[in-house]
Amino acid sequence: MSHKPQLVDDDARERIRAALDESLFVEAAAGTGKTTVLVSRIVNVLAAGAARVDQVLAVTFTEKAAGELKLRLRQELERARRDNGAAPHLDDAIARLEDAQVSTIHSFCADLVRERPVEARVDPGFEVLDDAEARRLFDRAFDGWMEETLADPPEGVRRALRRRPPGGFQTEPDSREPTRRLAAAAWRLAEWRDFTAPYRRDPFARDARILTVVKALLAFADLTARAGNQRNDRLYLATRPARLLADAIRAPAGGRHDDDGLEAQLAELSANRRFMDPYRGRGRLYGKDIERETVLARHAELGRLLLEFREAADADLAACLERELRAPVARYEQLKAASGTLDFLDLLLRARDLIRDDAVARRDFQRRFTRIFVDEFQDTDPLQAELLLLLAADDPDERDWERTRPRQGALFVVGDPKQSIYRFRRADLDVYARVRTQLEAAGVPVLHLTSSFRGAPSIQHCVNAAFAPQMTGGSAGGPTYVPLSPTRSDPVGQPTVIALPVPRPYGAQRVSAAAIERSLPDAVGAFVRWLLQESGWTITESGSAAGDGERRVPIQPHHVCVLFRRFQHYRRDMARPYADALEARDIPHLLVGGRSFHEREEVATVRAALAAIEWPDDRLSVFATLHGSLFAIDDETLFAYFHRYGVPRPFRIPGALRADGTSSPERVRFQPITEALLLLEELHGRRNERPVDVTLGQLLEATRAHAGFAMRESGRQALANVLQIGELARQHEAAGGLSFRSFVEHLLEEAEAGRGEEAPILEEGAEGVRLMTVHRAKGLEFPVVVLADPTCRLRRPGADRYIDPERGLCALRLAGCAPIDLIEHEQEEVSREGAEAVRVAYVAATRARDVLVVPATGDGPREGGWASPLDDAIYPPAGDGRDPETAPACPRFGRDSVLQRPPDVAASAATVVPGQPRLECGAVGGGGPAVVWWGPH
């Protein structure tokens, strides 16, 4: 008879299963089976008759998670019925399972509001806008407002249109265009419109402040113009922007000064990194009778004035914009009301207001939902918390959620504050902490699940060693670390934690981000190829429970996931080099949620063809269509046609080439062009008589494109992307798009803005290495996890928002400008964002079951990267990495983890030699196999 091993948290798990008359608050670490315990509690509640299935409310935060939760619930109910024999409560629960409210918080809110539309003050037939539809409707509202506003722009808009964005705070890929920057700022206000407090606007004597800075600038320009060596002095060259601006001020365009323009130019100069942090140059003297230190001191003084001016000007401008951009937000509200639509925030607000303000509705829903289960509570926001606590309240007359107490057994909350990484989606860890404190004070027990069934023990020890010193609670609102407890066994003779060195991390003189970004993708591709084709390593299939005996299988492409902190950086696709490295080695892969949709060749091909159908006289679109992969007409044929007949165009096909029943060598030679042009003619003529996706389907069918795209490397992704264009067309028409041209223009605008995700094709068991962001991977697990793009910064240099719930204030950085409330609390907010950045690394590391691969630089850690919280767990102390042991089940490595250094740089005591150095990832939780440092290729 076999017995399951006793777990350190068995008592907590038993209490969750059996204490059905208690409300519980459960903190479940990564991989501890929180969904399993949540489902088991629901099953026990139903089996005991403590609630009917229609009285159960189970809330999670994604549609996928809600679907999986309902599926797991059905499976466990059926298993319980088999095990328990006659069970009338279970029979009823299974028969009526569809009556259970198992959904996302937004779907639940929509159901509440639909049931009581009058009390919720909404159109009874309202439709819900998804994120893309809401943004399109908002853009309509903003564009209409902007067109009217430009006739006489108010102060904030006028000043903002003169600004160039400072680096680092673009909120969208198209944010460098001034009006789009304003649109992005207005959209942010719309996303936080439930915070209605106006921004503080302190007195700002702009003209006087400009005069002070300009006076210092002109003096500094005159001083630096007297350099002794104007050709080679690096300080002279670095300060050139000040002299150029001084010249422009002395000779203003049109003969008069423009204060808005001067403000913008001074702000831009203060953001010029090369000017603000210049090279010192060489020599004591800068010029005749001018000490270099004098110039540097004057530069420091000017820099201080510039920064102070920009901070004050930005705060003033942010307050202006907040006031003025409320107008397009109000117009957006009007458009929604006119079209009978609600966005996701509306659902939360209307449902919260309904439950809080309508006593009859509140009592009705409290009686109906007697058992409330909340998953992923660390991702909640104040509105969601307020709604759920009011529904669980023991006093139906209480409408202040912070004074409620839950009914006995009514509330079961599970979450993990260490995995709270959705601050950008309004998730608020402070709310989590406040609710926990409130429930504890009301007598609700807090239980901890720490036994993790996911990672191998050595991976868990590495994670514990890395994050325990960094998650210590404190003023940043972060949680105190609770170590993972292992339940599995480590594989015998096979590493689990790999440090993968960047082969060529050096630029001209030092380790550089650009060099790492050039070198690492190929190293990852080479490692994955070896892992799949040569290693002989095995992994445990997901779902093979330890208690049933782990089944180890060879590693396949779908077992591997490459995780990114970001997919785009200043319009650059950060995942593309990694995908190219896999493609070069014929390794199938799936890019999940990539933001390079419009840059994909197949999408550009179809986009050009649709433009050619709409505008047959557009030479470039027609040529791109003929030459692209739909028709694939070669250069020689196109050149010969052009030389003989001119530019190929629909409706201008030479008569000699049109079919008349005869044949000629020239007609045969140019037949592919003729047939393509005739198809474009036919599709153009009927484009507005049928839906866009039908026209697209006929184009793809006539060119046999489905098979062509599917046969490519990563063809499933290519075909899915092409079919996604048809789906976008259907969505566009459903949202009110009136013509083929309107869709083509929309597609071109989206491509220009860089918006649009790759088509989702991820399926369980689908073949291919996954490439996805950490946020996409949350809630998932993979046998092999490779962390990528280590140059992504751990945290940004400044904060993006400050929230004061008591005042109803959300102070956002608008168009790159920080309001005064954000400036005054910036360090506090930077600390919060830094704490979340560490949690992102924790979530990434805890996705791995059998192998965790962490990028590294062989000559010592490079600080500040998003994966750097793991550095202390993978780097040996200086000197201890020079004489490693031979790594088991690995290829023969060389003696250096860096393939190429500058001539004047040599390996040092900090350099780690490939192999297994004297380091164990067991600082917390015991020993385990050492980290293996890979050998670069």
Image: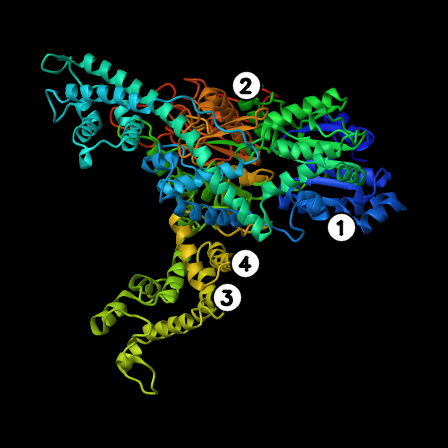
Query: Amino acid type of disc 3?
Result: Pro
Q: Is residue 676 above or below residue 794?
A: below
Secondary structure state at the residue bearing disc 4: helix
Dot label at residue 469: 2
Dot label at residue 691: 3
Residue under label 1: 98
**Nearest to the observer: residue 800 or residue 763:** 800
- Which of disc 2 and disc 1 is earlier in sequence? 1
> On the image, which quarter does residue 554 sit in?
top right
- Callout in the foreground (2, 3): 3
User: Residue at 67% of width from left, 41% of height from top?
Assistant: 544
- Report the Cα–Cα distance between label 4 and label 3: 11 Å
Secondary structure state at the residue bearing disc 1: helix
- Report the Cα–Cα distance between label 2 and label 4: 52 Å
User: Residue at 58% of width from left, 24% of height from top?
Assistant: 464
Q: Point out residue 161 in the picture as x, y percentages from the top left corner.
A: 34, 38
In what quadrant of the picture does the N terminus appear? top right
- Callout in the foreground (1, 4): 4
- Number of marks: 4
- Report the Cα–Cα distance between label 2 and label 3: 59 Å
Q: Point out residue 545 in the picture as x, y percentages from the top left corner.
A: 69, 39
Q: Residues within 10 Å of mark 3 (few under 14, many from 20)?
A: some
Q: Is residue 150 above or below residue 909?
A: below
Q: Point out residue 572 in the picture as x, y percentages from the top left corner.
A: 38, 42
Q: Is residue 6 visible?
A: no
- Which of disc 4 and disc 1 is earlier in sequence? 1
Dot label at residue 455: none
Residue under label 4: 734
- Which of disc 3 and disc 4 is earlier in sequence? 3
